[in-house]
Image (tube, rainbow, N blue to C red):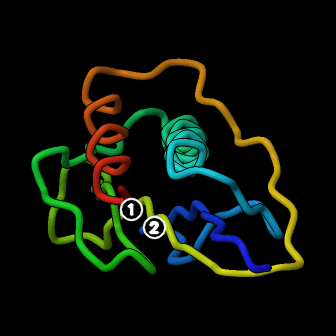
């Protein structure tokens, strides 16, 4: 029997590469958002909180792969964006793990969490 798993990814706009914990599959969309927000927190730390996250932009994509949040270094929308993404995978041989939990969650991050959970219902 196959199960639906979620995976959180983050894109680094400056280094132009993706970030994720390899072979990390999560059971719920809520866990995937928590993992994505943990990756966001790590990127904010690396770039000394100079990433301006665009909470007004709508989520883009399908249930297979959706970009939930986009950000720009120093708010420059002409630069390559940073992003948080949730993808789904149906598999029988994967094992779910515990997500990275962010240390703090802002009101705006809670709103993103709520939107993603309702998107996947």
The picture quadrant where one finds residue 25 is bottom right
Q: Name the residue tied to disc 1.
A: 82
Circle 1/circle 2 CB separation < 8 Å: yes
Instruction: In this rendered view, identify the residue nearer to me: 10 or 101.
Output: 101
Image quadrant occupied by the C terminus: bottom left
Instruction: In this rendered view, identify the residue nearer to me: 70 or 17.
Output: 70
Q: Residue at x 66, y 66 (%)?
A: 5
Q: Position of residue 100 (x, y in %)?
A: 70, 39
Mark 1 vs mark 2, CA separation in Å: 8 Å
Number of labelled discs?
Answer: 2
Q: How packed is label 2: few (under 14 Cα within 10 Å), some, or many (20 or more)? A: few
Q: Is residue 98 above or below residue 10?
A: above
Q: Name the residue tied to disc 2.
A: 14
Q: How packed is label 1: few (under 14 Cα within 10 Å), some, or many (20 or more)? A: many
Q: Position of residue 14 (x, y in %)?
A: 45, 67
Where residue 95 is drawn, which disc sits there?
A: none
């Amino acid at each position: 029997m196959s199960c639906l798993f979620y995976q959180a990814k983050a894109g680094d706009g400056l280094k132009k590469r993706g970030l994720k914990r390899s072979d990390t599959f999560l059971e719920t969309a809520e866990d995937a958002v928590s993992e994505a927000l943990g990756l966001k927190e790590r990127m904010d730390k690396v770039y000394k909180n100079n990433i301006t996250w665009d909470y007004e932009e709508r989520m883009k994509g399908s249930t297979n792969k959706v970009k939930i949040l986009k950000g720009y270094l120093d708010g420059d929308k002409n630069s390559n964006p940073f992003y948080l993404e949730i993808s789904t995978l149906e598999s029988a041989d994967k094992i779910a793990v515990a997500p990275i939990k962010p240390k703090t969650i802002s009101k705006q991050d809670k709103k993103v969490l709520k939107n993603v959970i309702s998107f996947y219902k």
